[in-house]
Amino acid sequence: MRFQYSSTMAVFLVLLLAMTVVVIEGVIRCDTTAKEREMIVEDALGNLRESQDFQVIQGTLTFNHRQIGNPAGRYGTVSFPTWSQPLGLCKSTTFNQTSPIPFSFCNIAFTLGPRDAIVWLGCTPPPAAYFSIRSYVAFRFSPSVWFPAAELGDPANHMTLNSTGGPEDPFEKTTMVFSTGDRETARHVKRAFAKAGFPRGSSNLDVIPAELARFRERQETAFWVQDKSDAFAWQFRVSQFEDPEAAEAYFDQTWPVYFLRARPEYEKRGAKPIPRPEARPRGTGQDEAYLHPSLDKLEEEIIVAYASKGSKLSYRFPMDHIVPDIERCLTDPQYAPIFKPVPAWHFPGWPSCDWFSADALYTGLPDTTDLSALTFPTNRTFVVMGVNQPRLQKSIYSNLMLTAVAHFEGMKACKGHKNKKLRGTRLQSSERHSEYTPLDRIKFILYPHPGTSGWVYLCFSLK
Ligand SMILES: *[C@@H]1O[C@H](CO)[C@@H](O)[C@H](O)[C@H]1NC(C)=O
Ligand SMILES: *[C@@H]1O[C@H](CO)[C@@H](O)[C@H](O)[C@H]1NC(C)=O
Ligand SMILES: *[C@@H]1O[C@H](CO)[C@@H](O)[C@H](O)[C@H]1NC(C)=O
């Protein structure tokens, strides 16, 4: 991302720092205090250290990556000190200017041995429509670097997560989540935390299945450039929080996260792989064909309404569902289920499963679409219509994001309309969503971006 440093920016940064100080002082709500959690963790890590099986490396879990992503939600990622990661990993996980998405995932991706674990004990977010935690294979390096960003199984979400509140009361409660591919390590971790007084029923094993993952080989003796093992990452998603202030206080926390690196002796004893857990069934199985006549009617009404204002229908794009095939995400470096190539835009496509979550359904344009028609001059209005799934109680929320190829998903793309306002609009749109009738439309008005030669990034206003 090109970035020009100016004195205005310096002022902005100073202001930002001042604001950060205030927010850090804001206390998050949780059923444990930071001191209590610290004592449990210290005690548990002490138990783990005693076994001599692990080296403990402290990292952080933060929500501060605002450069990219869906403005209706926030993404937490974990980061470990550079010295604890293979030399060259940072460079290999930073996209350069010629890649479609110039962005750095340096320090949010880490390598793992077959018996290693990542452990977080912390608090769940304040009330939100949704949250979940899952490990992913972010990067693969063989035959050469590519970005599967593939989810390794169903995430633990607000409806399934074990916490001190249980699934009925998942917010602002204490939880422990740990990722490993090894059964014995999982037992060690659970036992260490239980001995430290943390309830067993409040911990969550995030399985990294050996069938899918490429772990490091013999970490002490082999170089990463030789084994070319995966770079993993965590995605901690929080979407559509109820109280923005409580949410900001939560997102401003820096949570400690621990990397338990198997010591050579323990590693040599051999991994005990945990099999891949069975996936949760998707969907309710209820047919929606009965809504077709109403949808057709709605479409007609929209066309008539626009015609009366002097507009005519230029294009009609039927949408399609996208559910990436995770195994293909991990084995086919050319697989681009989400961002397909668009020669008319000189867009090479993006071979990635882009952090798709099994908890979600993505909707996009089918392969047969003439994407060259999908441009947004200011005289064009873009209307989306369809079934309001939250209203049918088939999903918790849905949202829509428009993004341009340039400044893809960029928060800065809406400079003219202020990021904060954009976020507000987006939040509002999602909150209101449940008030719509089951068949509804959202109207997007697209504004040109000042200083660019054509159209538009992703600003819209809701009718
Ligand atoms: C830049 O990124 C592109 C696309 O990801 C890749 O093909 C190319 O090798 C990279 N170039 C350098 C110098 O890293
Ligand atoms: C949640 O807790 C229950 C009861 O202890 C346990 O059986 C289950 O495996 C836990 N879930 C996860 C994801 O670890
Ligand atoms: C809308 O704007 C585009 C691009 O500026 C232009 O080519 C097109 O003719 C306009 N269409 C109408 C109906 O004015």
Image (cartoon, rainbow, N blue to C red):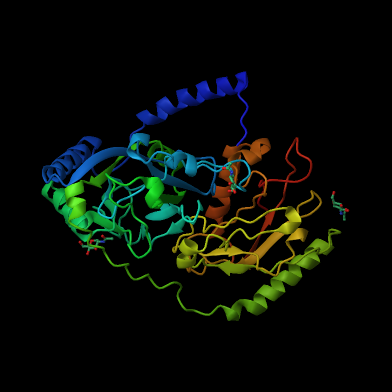
Q: How many marks?
A: 0
Image position of 180 with respect to 68: above or below: below
The one nearer the camera, 135 or 142, is 142
Q: Residue 62, how many percent across, how many down?
A: 39, 40
In depth, the one of 78 and 95 nearer the eye is 95
Left/right placement of residue 30 relative to residue 9 reads left
Across and down, in percent, residue 330 comes to 46, 62
Q: Position of residue 97 (x, y in %)?
A: 62, 41
Residue 184 sits in quarter:
bottom left
Q: Which image quadrant for residue 49?
A: top left
Describe residue 79's horizontal placement relative to residue 448 as left or right: left
Left or right position of 332 against 299: left
**Can you see residue 83?**
yes
- In the rendered image, residue 111, in percent from the top left (x then y), is placed at 36, 48
| x 50%, y 26%: residue | 16
- Nearer to the camera, 375 or 344: 344
The correct choice, above or below, for 431 with respect to 391 in the image is above
Please state, as top left, top right, bottom left or bottom right, where the N terminus lies in the image.
top right
Instruction: Give left or right: position of 314 versus 5.
Output: right
Would you say residue 132 is visible in this rendering? Answer: no
